[in-house]
Every structure is written in structure tokens, then in C-alpha cells.
Amino acid sequence: MKIVVCIKQVPSSEARVQINADGTSIESGELELVVNPYDENAVEEALQIKEAKGGETIALTVGSDKAEAALRACLNQGIDKAMIVKDPSLQGGDFLGTAKILAAALKQINPDLILLGKLSIDEENSAVGPALAELLGLPHVAVASKLEWIDDTSLKVSREVEGITEILALSLPAVITANKGLNEPRYASLRGIMAAKKKPIEAIDPTGLGLDPNVVGAAGRKISILKMEPPPPRAEGKVLQGEPQETVPELVRLLREEAKVL
């Protein structure tokens, strides 16, 4: 079985984000960049499937040279192979452009199962997975919380939908996007890190993908960012001194008249 995990490098959720002077992008020079957390669940699931059923695992991404660090993190965890499409002319597109690039690369790889996170924490559009499945003409389940194999070519996928658990069956090849509850991503072991040093990161030749930069790159974006701005600063909190019988009425008054939450 060949399993491909599509990953994205994103700013850490703990990073202090600064908006560029253009007002439509963030300053990425000093940001800590990591593997998208939901993609980590997809990586872990790929590793567990390989351990149970055998096969080959591949991490695939679209990005610049910096994104190779995210691929290396996947190799450290145990992924067998890493691949990247990093042609500058293909970068800067929206979710649909990214899906088209991934789809073109995946057609060459011809995997049995494609995994990725349900969304990326930088854009949160939850659209690459469904778009990828549509472009490839494959069955797709989003926001997966549990995978159970029926046989070697079919499985049941559970997902939480508005307070209920929905269980779907699908046959391979297929696309599945991972939710946080799917598993607990492992830490890279020293043995895994040492083994990963011998694993190369393959750059996919974009000329063989048949992609038009005017369609998948920045020029082909269907979605534009008009403005980015930080949230308004929070007002300073108040500390009420005194006995409960004195402070509780005052707290209720403040909640009603100033905070207007009552």
C-alpha cells in the first residue's frame, strides 16, 4: 500500500504574528514555522497504517526551500520518503491552486490512500482536501476521527458531525482529512532522526506536471486578501476589593452596565 500525506508548513500557534506594511500579509522572516498540527495527525495515521498493514509512506508539500524543514520533521517521525514542488512560479496561489498542484503530483505518484489535515491553522478554509478529491475523482471523507479497516481495499471512517457520530464506508483509492481526535502524534525518536538523515527530499520537476502558473500561481488566485489587522487590544481588567457581600453586587453591576453581558 502506498500512502501519501499532504502537509503544509505554517507559523507556530505560539508565534507572535506581525502584519507587513502592505497590510495584506504577515512578516514571516523570524516566525517559527512548523508542520500544520492537523497534518501531524495525518502523518501519525499513515505511520500506524504502515505498521499494521505494511507499505510505503510519502510526505508531499508545495512550498519554498523553507518547507523542506517540515518534510524533514515528517521523515524524523518515520515517514519513508519526502517530495516537494517548489517552483517559485507556482507559488502564491489560493486553495484551489494548491489542490491543482498536489493533484498533478499525485497522479504521477499514484497512491492508494491520500491523507491530510482537515484544515491549515494559518488560513482555516478546510477546502484543499475536498478540492483535491474532486480533481482526482476519488471518494472523500472529511474531519475523520477514527479509521477501521474492512479489508485491504476498503474501510469505515467515523467523524463527529453536530453532536452525532457519522460512519461512512469507502473503497481505495480515497482522500481522507484528519481531525485532532484521530490519534496522538508521536515524538520523533533519536533512532528515527538518525535514520532520516539518509532519506533525501525529492524535488518534483514542475515541467512534467503540465501546470500553468497563470492558473495555479499568484496570477490565478480566485480569492484575494483585502486587509489584515490585529484584533483590538483588550481593556484592562478590574480587581474588586472587599468582602463577597460587597463585591458581588458591584461585579453584577459592572457585568450589566459596562461589559453588557447580563
Image (cartoon, rainbow, N blue to C red):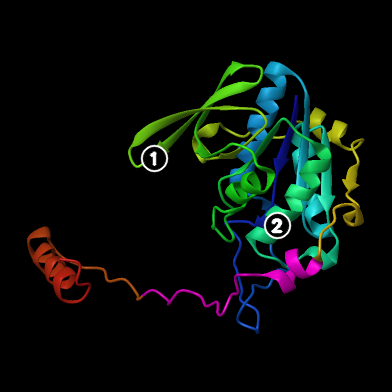
* Residue at point 74%, 63% (across, down): 216
> Dot 2: what SS?
helix
Task: Quadrant for residue 249, please give it.
Answer: bottom left
Q: Residues within 10 Å of mark 2 (few under 14, many from 20)?
A: many
Along the viewing direction, whichever of 257 and 231 lies nearer the viewer: 231
Earlier-in-chain disc, 2 versus 1: 2
Residue 20, relative to residue 182: is it above or below?
A: below
Looking at the picture, how far across and down is residue 161, in whole percent? 39, 40
Residue 169, relative to residue 81: is it above or below?
A: above
Q: Residues within 10 Å of mark 1 (few under 14, many from 20)?
A: few
Residue 167, relative to residue 232: is it above or below?
A: above
* Residue at point 70%, 28% (across, down): 47
> Dot 1: what SS?
strand
* Residue at point 70%, 47% (across, down): 7
Looking at the picture, how far across and down is residue 233, in whole percent? 42, 76
Residue corresponding to mark 1: 161
Looking at the magenta stretch, what is its main secondary structure?
Answer: loop
Task: Quadrant for residue 115, please give it.
Answer: top right
Looking at the picture, how far across and down is residue 17, in whole percent? 60, 69
Q: Amino acid at mark 2?
A: Thr
* Residue at point 61%, 61% (across, down): 15
Residue corresponding to mark 2: 98
Along the viewing direction, whichever of 221 and 203 lies nearer the viewer: 221
Residue 104: mark in rendering: none
The stretch of residues the image draws in magenta is 213-234
Q: CA distance from mark 2 to mark 1?
A: 27 Å
The C terminus - image quarter: bottom left
The N terminus - image quarter: top right
Looking at the picture, how far across and down is residue 147, in whole percent? 55, 26
Q: Amino acid at mark 1?
A: Val
